[in-house]
Image (tube, helix red, strand yellow):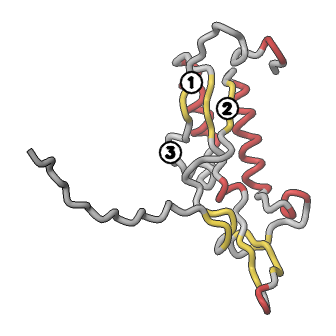
């Protein structure tokens, strides 16, 4: 583990080689379709090719797959993951999937075993919802077309 000035990403003048990483078998579905043996092979190949850093993306809908169920008068009564309630522990109460957190920890260990550093992209521009039915990010509304003004040629 690196700390302070000895961290390879913080050393002035040092050039590191890396890439964005999605598992070769599943792409952006890698967290839902978790196959650690494939991921381990991918990481071994990347390290053997000389890569030092991977940027990874724990997708919000996978790691915090929350749906807020509402009862009478719109009052929230349960936070769920799919059709099953989230666990009643610290992670579940925070709306996090313990399974996905375990997968991420396993991923970190696989990367460490290959000597790969990770840059974790916690927020990406294409995450579409925080809670189903609430707090959505939407594309901007189209601008009203401006009325074309007739061009007046300068009189000669």
Find numbered disc 2 in the image and state the secondary structure of the residue it sits on. Answer: strand
Task: Point out the tag, 2 or 1, that comes first from the N-terminus.
Answer: 1
Q: CA distance from mark 2 to mark 1?
A: 10 Å
Q: Position of residue 138 (x, y in %)?
A: 54, 63
Query: Residue at point 68% right, 37% down?
Result: 120
To which residue does mark 3 refer?
Answer: 25
The quarter of the image holding the C terminus is top left
Q: Relative to 80, does residue 98 appear above or below in the rendering?
A: above
What residue would you read off at disc 2? 119
Asked which secondary structure carries label 1, the reply is: strand
Q: Residue furthest right?
A: 89
| Residue nearer the viewer, 67 or 109 | 67
Query: Residue most toward the bottom?
Result: 72
Distance, label 3 to label 1, CA atoms, is 20 Å
Residue drawn where x is 80% and y is 12% of the image:
5
SS at badge 3: loop
Contact flag, marks 2 and 1 (Cβ < 8 Å): yes
Give the x, y percent position of residue 99. 75, 55
């Amino acid at each position: 583990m690196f700390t302070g000035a000895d961290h390879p990403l913080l050393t002035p003048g040092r050039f590191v080689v890396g890439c964005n990483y999605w598992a070769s078998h599943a792409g952006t579905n890698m967290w839902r379709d978790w196959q650690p043996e494939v991921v381990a092979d991918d990481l071994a190949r990347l390290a053997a090719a000389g890569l030092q850093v991977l940027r990874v993306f724990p997708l919000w809908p996978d790691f915090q797959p929350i749906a807020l169920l509402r009862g009478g008068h719109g009052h929230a009564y349960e936070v769920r993951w799919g059709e099953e309630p989230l666990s009643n522990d610290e992670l579940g109460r925070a709306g996090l999937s313990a399974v996905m957190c375990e997968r991420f920890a396993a991923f970190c260990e696989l990367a460490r075993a290959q000597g790969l550093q990770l840059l974790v992209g916690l927020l990406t521009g294409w995450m579409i919802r925080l809670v189903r039915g609430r707090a959505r990010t939407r594309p901007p509304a189209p601008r009203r077309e401006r009325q074309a003004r007739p061009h007046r040629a300068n009189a000669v």
